[in-house]
Image (cartoon, rainbow, N blue to C red):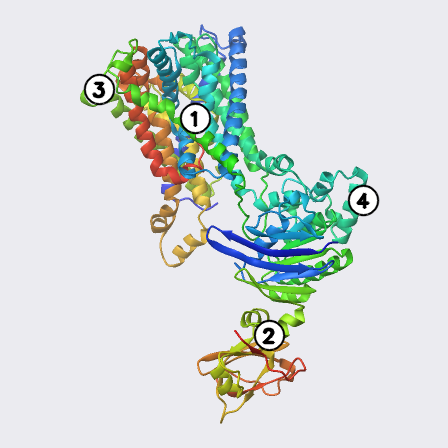
């Protein structure tokens, strides 16, 4: 178990700044996610942490030791890759034994460790299979087993679930969470999927254009975003400028500020006489229904629990919009930028 | 199997006729001859009689030479594949084209170029004499050393091409994973990278082994008293001992076909294809400037060495006739050699012959190759896989053997010769070229047909187009690149062909390669060099136009 400190990391590729003066603290045993759109620099940050890339300036500290100049072999970090990166020329057990052999572990110990880690990831029956014969989900579990068996100080996950299909992704996500909690290994998890980050993490850092936009618990980044990027990326919030806030909700934001409302915080109500909005799209997904409402050229996304919906709205209906309080607070979210 | 139309039946009949007449019948004649005593009686002991001590040592030498060639080519080819994949080198694509020049260079040109560069009377020797006044005759470039150097020069690009494409498929993440699991660079190289290259290295080894067994030009020119199978077959034939020549030819063919079968078996076998979504990451290490500079300098020197023989040829092509024995550095440059070739009919005729025969060979291979591929893939004819196997057989039959088999089969009129003695006519040469190169065109057409999504043709049919229109508008244009690429390769292999030509030509059917050889015999350095340069340029122009797909195809004489 270890803590990780990232101090003032800057990285440029040719003339493009990928990361600029970036700081993060990951505590012992924590499951920490870095979430952001593609190209935000999250994978580069992960590779710098692993020692696969080197920063132009800044420091990486693991357990208060400066590892910035250390090669990947010396860092005791394990990586779980998006495309699994299993050695195709080896079997399942050979893949898992690889790291242990390098640590000069005793043969009998290796065998025991392989057996127990395969049990953890429920792949005992595939011990001697070639890794190329496994399904995507199985390959991902082998790649996780290969890393945790060496008991690293830190596990780095590079979008490990994005190549799995939806049902498998949810299943593997739950398993991952359980494994990490049981093993208690400090984990840094990189993803572009905010739902995944919210479900798995103790804390989340939201990254955009190489800059940390906000760090906090899942609840904090979801309900208390510090800026419009976090609000939009994490909660798919609707943003209203000074004028629209005034017209639609009669809220004064102040000059140049934004009102941010999550889709589930806005309730469309049928109002054929005074309704300012028109329903342009209805998407029923079972438990909830998503309405798109157009007001003054602006499309507003709203989300309602289907069961609570007394009247079913249709495309073309005129509606007025009410603000709901979902989080039990009556404070409106006003953002500076 | 779909019902065949009359046209398709005729096509099938033509292919079967060709296969029987020009592949199977000559091979059978060859085997029969190998069991015939010099007095014409059939006796199994004849085969064994041919295996005197000299034949055994020729077999041993050929195999040893091939093993050394494979090892040397592997070292060179893999080294450069690795450097080009993982190091930063300026003008990378330019240099990667330069270092595969030997793969397209006709073998005879390579041999002649090395002769002019390194032999006792070669450029280097003369240069030393000229500059330092040294006696250059201490230079000995012949025998095993010469043959091995030329073989490695000609065949290492095979390893380079195979291993490069395997390296490109290795996922950079597996290398990173290995590092982060604590493995050193060396451990990663031997445990993760090398095992993933093994299938391609085996493939290249088999091809280079076969090519080296079949190689004739280098042992012929530099072999001296050393015996090799191909040169022994040639001299037995020239001495009129058909039986001994046939026995040796059968021996050589059996070894080659064995390797061909190994190759086919290996190709159908496993490769490390990993199924996953997403793209593998390609890595270029390049943290260390020193390593990159070293690699770049190394590449530059090596590329220079690769083109040096060709540059020598170019230089000598501008030297006046008959100056080989003199110190030619003081002589003025002349374009006399070229004007003679283009000005006088007797010197220009070989070009006409070579072009004519190569074009005929290309036409034959296109008709048979595309026809076979069409019938096998699209019409699913019964026994198609047998037909394909027989048509790929010549890939394992050395040119010397095909020429010998043709002589034995076609020196009297038969149904396959159009009822004349084919030996001595112009037709026997393009037929030999066509048979040798059939596997290339058949394979590239088959993969061309396979790569077409059947639903495209179904879509065309459903819109009311008939079979002919669909072929002309949809299927034809889609397989055209594959066929063109194969055809150009056949052309390249035919235009500089020397191995079977030297056994089959007559005075009126002299080709460029034969002309180069006879000018060489007459010590007309300038003429031989300028023929060589013109042939080299023709080949390079053709290669330039097929460059994009050349890397994928494998064909070498």
- The answer to whether B40 is drawn above or below residue A95 in the figure is above
* Chain of the residue where label 4 is placed in the rendered structure: A
Between circles 4 and 1, the one closer to the viewer is 4
**The quarter of the displayed image where residue A4 is located:** bottom right
Q: Secondary structure at mark 1?
A: helix
Between circles 2 and 1, the one closer to the viewer is 2
How far from the left and from the top, in percent, is residue B60?
54, 14
- The answer to whether A282 is drawn above or below residue B431 in the figure is below
Residue labelled with disc 3: B334
> From this viewpoint, is residue A316 visible?
yes
Q: Secondary structure at mark 2?
A: loop
Mark 4–mark 1 Cα distance, whole angstroms, equals 61 Å
Quarter holding the N terminus of chain A is bottom right
Q: Nearer the viewer, residue B350 or B531?
A: B531
How far from the left and from the top, in percent, is residue B410?
37, 19
Between circles 1 and 3, the one closer to the viewer is 3
**The quarter of the displayed image where residue B239 is located:** top left
Between circles 3 and 2, the one closer to the viewer is 3
Using the rendered image, report if marks 4 and 1 lie on a common chain.
no
Between circles 3 and 4, the one closer to the viewer is 3
Mark 3–mark 4 Cα distance, whole angstroms, equals 80 Å
Using the rendered image, report if marks 3 and 4 lie on a common chain.
no
Mark 1–mark 3 Cα distance, whole angstroms, equals 47 Å
Label 1 CA crowd tier, 10 Å (few <14, some 14–19, many 20+)? many
């Amino acid at each position: 178990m270890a803590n990780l400190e990232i101090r003032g990391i800057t990285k440029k590729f040719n003339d493009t700044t990928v990361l600029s003066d970036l700081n993060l603290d990951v505590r012992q045993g924590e499951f920490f996610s870095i979430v952001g759109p593609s190209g935000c620099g999250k994978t580069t940050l992960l590779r710098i942490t692993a020692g696969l890339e080197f920063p132009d300036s800044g420091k990486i500290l693991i357990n208060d030791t400066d590892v910035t100049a250390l090669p990947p072999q010396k860092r005791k970090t394990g990586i779980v890759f998006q495309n699994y990166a299993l050695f195709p020329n080896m079997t399942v057990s050979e893949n898992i034994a690889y790291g242990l052999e390098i640590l000069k572990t005793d043969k009998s110990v290796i065998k025991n460790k392989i057996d127990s880690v395969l049990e953890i990831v429920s792949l005992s029956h595939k011990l001697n299979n070639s890794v190329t014969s496994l399904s995507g989900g199985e390959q991902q579990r082998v790649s996780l087993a290969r890393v945790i068996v060496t008991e690293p100080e830190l596990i780095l996950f590079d979008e490990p679930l994005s190549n799995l299909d939806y049902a498998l992704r949810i299943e593997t996500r739950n398993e991952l969470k359980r494994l990490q909690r049981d093993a208690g290994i400090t984990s840094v998890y990189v993803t572009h999927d905010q739902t995944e980050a919210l479900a798995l993490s103790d804390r989340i850092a939201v990254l955009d254009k190489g800059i940390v936009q906000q760090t906090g618990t899942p609840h904090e980044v979801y309900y208390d975003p510090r800026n419009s990027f976090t609000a939009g990326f994490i909660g798919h919030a609707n943003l209203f400028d000074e004028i629209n806030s005034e017209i639609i909700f009669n809220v004064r934001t102040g000059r140049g500020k934004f009102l941010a409302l999550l889709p589930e915080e806005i309730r469309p109500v049928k109002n054929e006489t005074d309704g300012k909005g028109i329903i342009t799209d209805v998407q029923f997904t079972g438990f909830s229904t998503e309405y798109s409402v157009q007001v003054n050229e602006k499309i507003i996304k709203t989300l309602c629990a289907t069961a609570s919906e007394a009247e079913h709205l249709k495309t073309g209906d005129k509606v007025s919009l009410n603000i709901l309080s979902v989080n039990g607070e009556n404070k409106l979210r006003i953002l500076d930028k | 199997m779909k019902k065949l139309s009359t046209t398709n039946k005729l096509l099938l009949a033509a292919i079967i006729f060709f296969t029987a007449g020009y592949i199977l019948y000559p091979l059978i004649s060859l085997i029969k001859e190998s069991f015939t005593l010099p007095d014409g009686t059939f006796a199994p002991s004849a085969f064994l009689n041919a295996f005197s001590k000299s034949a055994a040592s020729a077999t041993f030498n050929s195999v040893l030479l091939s093993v050394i060639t494979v090892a040397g080519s592997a070292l060179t080819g893999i080294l450069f594949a690795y450097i080009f994949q993982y190091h930063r080198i300026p003008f990378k694509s330019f240099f990667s084209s330069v270092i595969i020049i030997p793969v397209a260079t006709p073998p005879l040109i390579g041999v002649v170029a090395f002769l002019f560069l390194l032999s006792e009377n070669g450029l280097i020797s003369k240069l030393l004499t000229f500059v330092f006044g040294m006696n250059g005759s201490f230079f000995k470039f012949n025998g095993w050393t010469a043959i091995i150097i030329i073989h490695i020069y000609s065949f290492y690009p095979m390893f380079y091409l195979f291993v490069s494409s395997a390296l490109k498929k290795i996922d950079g993440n597996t290398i990173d994973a290995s590092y982060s699991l604590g493995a050193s660079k060396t451990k990663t190289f031997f445990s993760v990278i090398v095992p993933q290259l093994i299938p391609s290295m085996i493939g290249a080894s088999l091809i280079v082994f076969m090519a080296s067994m079949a190689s004739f030009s280098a042992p012929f020119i530099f072999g001296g008293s050393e015996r090799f199978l191909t040169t022994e077959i040639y001299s037995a034939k020239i001495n009129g001992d058909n039986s001994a020549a046939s026995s040796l030819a059968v021996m050589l063919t059996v070894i080659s076909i064995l390797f061909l079968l190994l190759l086919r078996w290996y190709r159908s076998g496993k490769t490390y294809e990993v199924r996953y979504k997403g793209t593998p990451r390609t890595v270029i290490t390049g943290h260390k400037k020193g390593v990159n500079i070293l690699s770049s300098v190394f590449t530059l020197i090596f590329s220079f060495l690769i083109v040096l023989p060709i540059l020598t040829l170019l230089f000598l092509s501008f030297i006046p006739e008959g100056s080989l024995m003199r110190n030619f550095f003081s002589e003025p440059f002349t374009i006399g050699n070229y004007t003679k070739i283009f000005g006088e009919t007797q010197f220009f005729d070989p070009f006409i012959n070579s072009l004519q025969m190569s074009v005929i060979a290309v036409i034959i291979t296109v008709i048979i190759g595309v026809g076979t591929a069409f019938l096998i893939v699209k019409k699913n004819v019964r026994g198609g896989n047998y037909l394909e196997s027989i048509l790929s057989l010549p890939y394992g039959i050395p040119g010397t053997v095909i020429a010998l088999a043709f002589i034995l089969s076609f020196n009297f009129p038969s149904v396959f010769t159009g009822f004349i003695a084919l030996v001595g006519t112009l037709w026997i040469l393009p037929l030999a070229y066509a048979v040798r190169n059939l596997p290339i065109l058949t394979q590239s057409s088959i993969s061309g047909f396979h790569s077409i999504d059947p639903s495209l043709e179904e879509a065309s049919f459903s819109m009311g187009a008939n079979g002919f229109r669909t072929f002309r508008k949809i299927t034809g244009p889609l397989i055209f690149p594959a066929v063109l690429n194969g055809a150009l390769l056949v052309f390249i292999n035919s235009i500089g062909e020397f191995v079977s030509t030297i056994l089959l030509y007559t005075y009126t059917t002299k080709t460029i390669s034969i002309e180069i050889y006879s000018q060489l015999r007459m010590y007309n350095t300038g003429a031989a060099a300028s023929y060589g340069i013109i042939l080299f340029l023709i080949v390079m122009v053709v290669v330039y136009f097929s460059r994009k797909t050349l890397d994928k195809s494998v064909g070498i004489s």
